[in-house]
């Protein structure tokens, strides 16, 4: 790990409501990097919000857009990229992230997700059926993929976002994935 080039691109993965965007923004700030939210980028490019994309193009259409955006974002340097909860589903996306950056998994409990996602507004996958059941099912399907892809896993990321970001920074430094300021 210590021979690795200085980190220049970081992907944050994890389920809905794990705080990827909030923590990602703080982390970018700490590192002096840019921050990009892939969901926001998808919306900007589509000129429509995610519920609209799901309505009109289905989840399949959304996933196509997600892959295209990730391919572009993976070319940015000095960037912290927050991904959507399902970005790890496509093997092509996983390959891309593994090849082009360091991957941080924010692992939170379903109880924390429930609290943070509120009524599920803006998240089409939470609009049908019981939200707790849906989140539990998605977590069971996806957690092995998050774990497999992650270089660093941070558990219980429900706390203060700035503190979580500092914790990630120190984990990355400890593992030789990030050069500290003094180096
Ligand atoms: C999704 C998560 C959402 C968004 C879309 C699908 C998912 O992002 O990409 O609604 O499949 O888990 P967040 O994880 O930022 O909520």
Image (cartoon, rainbow, N blue to C red):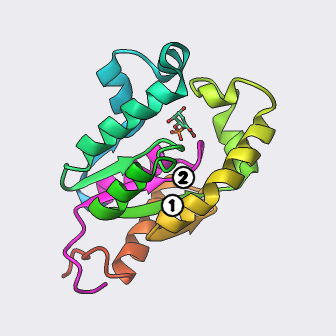
Q: CA distance from mark 1 to mark 2?
A: 5 Å
- The reply to whether residue 27 is in sight is no
Picture quarter with the N terminus: bottom left
Asked whether the beta carbons under mark 1 and mark 2 sit within 8 Å of each other, the answer is yes
The earlier-in-sequence mark between 1 and 2 is: 2
Badge 2 residue CB within 8 Å of ligand 1: yes
Image x and y of residue 18, in percent: 58, 49
Residue at 33 percent across and 55 percent down: it is: 96
Image x and y of residue 93, in percent: 39, 50
Query: Which residue is under mark 1?
Result: 105
Q: Is residue 38 left or right of residue 117?
A: left
Q: Is residue 3 magenta?
A: yes
Picture quadrant of ligand 1: top right
Q: Which mark is residue 14?
A: 2
Establish if 32 lies above or below 1: above
Q: Is residue 6 left or right of residue 114?
A: left
What segment is highlighted magenta in the picture? 1-30
Residue at 40 percent across and 32 percent down: it is: 64
Q: Is residue 113 magenta?
A: no
Picture quarter with the C terminus: bottom left
């Amino acid at each position: 790990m210590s021979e690795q080039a200085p980190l220049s691109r970081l992907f944050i993965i994890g389920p809905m409501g794990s705080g990827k965007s909030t923590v990602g923004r703080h982390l970018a700030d700490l590192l002096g990097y840019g921050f990009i939210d892939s969901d926001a980028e998808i919306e900007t490019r589509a000129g429509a919000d995610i519920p609209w994309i799901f309505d009109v193009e289905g989840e399949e259409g959304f996933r196509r857009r997600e892959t295209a955006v990730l391919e572009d974002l993976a070319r940015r340097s000095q960037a912290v990229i927050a991904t959507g909860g399902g970005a790890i589903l496509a093997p092509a996306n996983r390959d891309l992230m593994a090849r082009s950056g360091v991957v941080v998994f924010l692992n939170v409990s379903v109880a924390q997700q429930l609290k943070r996602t509120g009524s599920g507004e803006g998240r089409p996958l939470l609009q049908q059926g019981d939200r707790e059941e849906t989140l539990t099912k998605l977590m069971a399907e996806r957690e092995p993929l998050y774990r497999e892809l992650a270089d660093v896993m941070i558990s219980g990321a429900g706390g203060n976002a700035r503190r979580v970001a500092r914790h990630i920074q120190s984990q990355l430094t400890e593992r030789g994935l990030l050069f500290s300021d003094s180096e």
